[in-house]
Image: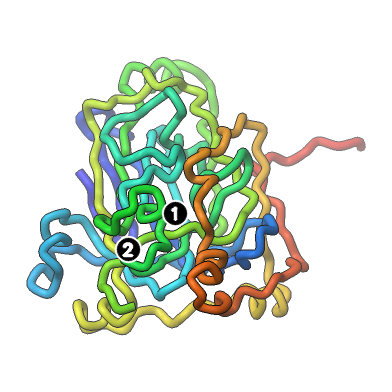
Amino acid sequence: MIELMNNELTFRFPEVHEEAECSIDFQRTLRIPDDNRAYPLPPGLGRFPVEHVDDFASNLPDTWRTHGGVFIPMYQSEALWINFNADYPCAVKIAAGKINAVSGKPWSNGLSADSQDYVVIPEQPWLDGFNVSEGLIRQFVAMPLGEGFTAEEQITGMAEHGGLQIIAYPMKHDVYVKRFERSLIEEPVLYSKVESRSPDMGLAPGGLMRQEIYEDEYGIDAWDQNNGFRCFIHLANSRQYQMITGHQPPHKPVTARDYTEAGLPWFDYYDDSKALAGSNTLGGLTSVGAKVIQTGQGLLPDNEPVQPKTVKIIRKGNVVRDGKF
């Protein structure tokens, strides 16, 4: 089952193992400059509010009611990253407009080992965008459907789905018991970075960011694909969100320039795990900044290059080094 609490989705698999669960939330963040420079990880600025579709069914489009799930508010050209939290290993597929954010292939249930199309948590602590090259992603940026910006429209030529789609599968009971309950292996520790007209929005590729998507070290046979849960996350623009819920959306996030000039930190994450190669399909997408120029709309606002002054290093497990005495 999937539960929504404190703006976080928790996927629970009690039929597999009493400890089998993982949580996912959606973090507001800076939209990094879209200038083909590779930036470090921007901060988390707090969770997006997440609402049940069924709580506002009478105010929603028919397609939203059909898909069910939840929705979050986003301003046009606002960015997000997806935060993962788990002690029990899970394999998670993420799609934007039913385009897989790791492989660039169309949505499908189930996992693929022939070109890995999922992330493994807790080894993968977060995902900020589309996997365009080994060690590089293009940031998730919200844009209205129907204007040609989203990954979905660029790949399929259609503006049909929008939003985010997520499906999670737990590690098989026997695999978990063998690997973790019958050994003295310490479980990995997760660290977080947290210190239009159309009501429908999708995710488009934004600026380049240094981020690795890690190879599955367990192998595809470790995952219980008979026990998965999926969720459709709709994206409502700020005006539509207020009309649907009666609540004000969060204020617009600060720009990358204002944040950097204030001396606040960016982040780099280090892990020795092997990274996946990028998707040729996703690597060929046109970024939001370039698309704005292509369509004759001038320049993307608040897109000036920045030079991060403070970059904090985050290491997997936060291991303390034993140096010379």
Residue 94, compared with residue 90, is above or below; it is below
Quarter of the figure that contains the C terminus: top right
Residue at point 65%, 47% (across, down): 269
Q: Residue at x 41, y 74 (%)?
A: 76
Q: Which residue is mark 2?
A: 6
Taking the image as drawn, is residue 126 in sight? no
Q: Sequence-wise, which precedes: disc 1 or disc 2?
A: 2
Secondary structure under tag 1 reads strand
Q: Horizontal and vertical percent for residue 213?
A: 54, 39
Mark-to-mark CA distance, 1 and 2: 15 Å
Left or right position of 125 against 211: left
Q: Give the image location of residue 89, x and y in percent.
A: 41, 32
Tell me the tag on residue 226: none
Which residue type carries mark 2? Asn
Task: Describe the element under mark 2 as helix, strand or loop.
Answer: loop
283 vs 115: above or below? below
As drawn, is 273 to the left or to the right of 95? right
| Position of residue 66 in the picture relative to residue 245 (left or right) | left
- Residue receiving disc 1: 82
Instruction: For residue 5, say whether it is visible.
Output: yes
Quick one: label 1, few (<14), some, or many (20+) residues within 10 Å?
Answer: some
- From the viewer's perspective, is the residue at label 1 or at label 2 nearer? 1
Image quadrant where one finds the N terminus: top left
- Which residue is rendered at x = 45% and y = 19% of the image? 179
